[in-house]
Amino acid sequence: MDPIVGTADAPSTDFIREAVAEDRRTGKHGGRVLTRFPPEPNGFLHIGHAKSICLNFGVAAGFDGACNLRFDDTNPTKEGLEYVRSIQEDVRWLGFDWGERLFFASDYFESLYSHAEQLIVDRLAYVDSLSADDTRAHRGTLTEPGRDSPHRARSVEENLALFREMRAGGFPDGAHVLRAKIDMASPNMNMRDPTLYRIRHVTHHRTGDAWCIYPTYDYAHPVSDAIEGVTHSLCTLEFEDHRPLYDWIVKHTRQPARPQQIEFARLNLNYTIMSKRRLLALVELGHVNGWDDPRMPTIAGARRRGYTPEAIRDFCGRIGVAKKANVVDIALLEHTVREDLNRRADRALAVVRPVKVVIENYPDDRDEQVTAVNNPDNPAAGTRTLPFSREIYIERDDFMENPPRRFFRLSPGNEVRLRYAYILKCERVVKDAAGVVTELRCTYDPESLDGTTATRRVKGTIHWVSATHARDAEVRLYDRLFLSSDPGEGGRDPLDDLNPDSLERVTGCKVEPALADARPGSRFQFERLGYFCVDPESRPEAPVFNRTVTLRDSWARISRQHPDPAAPGSRRDAG
Ligand code: ATP
Ligand code: MG
């Protein structure tokens, strides 16, 4: 694995690493560090999860520890094997390795159950039979204490008998719950006798019909952490108020290990939603083409879009880990991707909206190859040859019949350089009956081949492909999925903020010949257009390219104005 974080000797870089380093100094947890990444398999991983993955695996790697991948599969109604598979694929793709440390909370169901019986015996849990409405009424409010349920005083024997009957399937959903007996007057609502088990007659994707009672997150999570010997249980801020409960469960289930919960701010990105429930709705309602649609903020979507794992890890490093919630500007993510692709992506010529150019003074039968640089930022990438011929395509908007001042591309009577090739002059415009330009009749300067000593200079350079050699391709141009920087702001439905033009599929694009045979996943910079990658659906006879990012870097502009790296993201409270 890449050395993503500092080692134990390196200075800590955030409050969590500082806390872990301090625990190592004082010998807490015997000096061990064991973290876990605990996804619920109810959706694909998103870029927010990447932050948690980088943190958990990064802290482990930085302190000679280990990190478990644990599926928090305690809510079978929304979970499935498709997600178990995709999550593993995505964590691996991001560059992290859990080795043998793959776990499922469902593997602990028996143990969780016996700990629950023990809590009953210790008079720390009881079966409650209030209706959902009555439970709510007894719960109190933030300003008023709750009231004890009439069932709170049930005997150990009665509780045990009821709980066993719950497990045996003797009751319908919702008839009873198991609750911890803590304090109905606690100012912390989470401590007002929280639910530990619910009856749910549903089939679980791993345990089948073995169980019809399922533990809650608040109960299963600390026990699972303790069973695995997790030392630092890193979670997002919304669990801060659950920490006293976490500690209560660890203590009263008499765990030999004492995992410690530490909260950090979740990643929020503007123009993006990250709730899995909402992402699922986008998929199910057909607003996107699946979880791996390149517009989705999922890891699978980012991969298909052409992001690299290195760029995502780099981004997670740049945003850092803090206690205070904020919103990160998506321009920073795009900037990071661009920086990474600039180094690794070979250049290529592609014309997305072609118009034909006939070079009248170029010999009909001439077969010429010009030399192109693969990556000016990486000389090791070398050069390649491009076929040049009498008929070429250029980008339709690189020509203007009546150009404004300072238009340095092609126009009647004007000259422009063809990248890696010759200087071209437009002589005549051919139009159809509707007045649409169908062809440009041009001449070239045979003495102007790029790279030769005699080269003249002209103001503009445009890209092109040889018409006889070019291959047809489809190019998919992606824009933001949401128009609002805060989709769903003020209680609106985020779907109302969807960008209707987030995907534009352009067919009839012309690409340099070798591009059509590039393997799916290969990444290129189409000169002057942006970074693109070959879609998994692409075939040599029907190549498809996804635009990863354009070349316009709004982050570089913003960060020149605000050198403080945190400045561009507007702040808001934890959501
Ligand atoms: P969602 O709210 O999107 O449904 P979740 O928190 O329910 O996400 P889990 O599968 O439980 O999803 O998340 C696994 C881990 O990833 C948890 O430890 C969670 O805290 C962390 N995580 C989820 N979203 C983010 C985020 N936006 N930023 C950082 N960590 C996150
Ligand atoms: Mg969760």
Image (cartoon, rainbow, N blue to C red):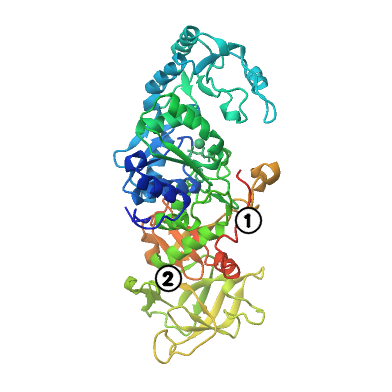
Q: Label 1 is placed on what type of residue?
A: Ser
Q: Left of 69 or right of it: where is 551?
A: right
Residue visible at 50% across and 59% down in the picture: 547
Of residues 235 and 121, the one nearer the viewer is: 121
Residue at coordinates 67% horizontally, 41% vertically from top-left? 493
Disc 1 is placed on an element classified as loop
Residue 468 has which mark?
2
Amino acid marked by disc 2: Thr
Taking 517 as reference, is 227 above or below it?
above
Q: Horizontal placement of 264 versus 257: left or right?
A: right
Question: Of discs 1 and 2, which sits in the foreground?
Answer: 1
Q: Position of residue 106 (x, y in %)?
A: 40, 27
The quadrant in which the C terminus is found is top right
Residue 65: name its quadrant: top left
Q: Nearer the viewer, residue 200 or 28?
A: 28
Q: CA distance from mark 1 to mark 2?
A: 51 Å
Q: Look at 43% across and 88% down and name the residue there.
A: 446
Where residue 108 sits, quadrant-wise, is top left
Residue 206 visible in the current orientation: no
Label 2: how many Cα within 10 Å (few below 14, some 14–19, many 20+): some
Q: Position of residue 38 (x, y in %)?
A: 43, 38
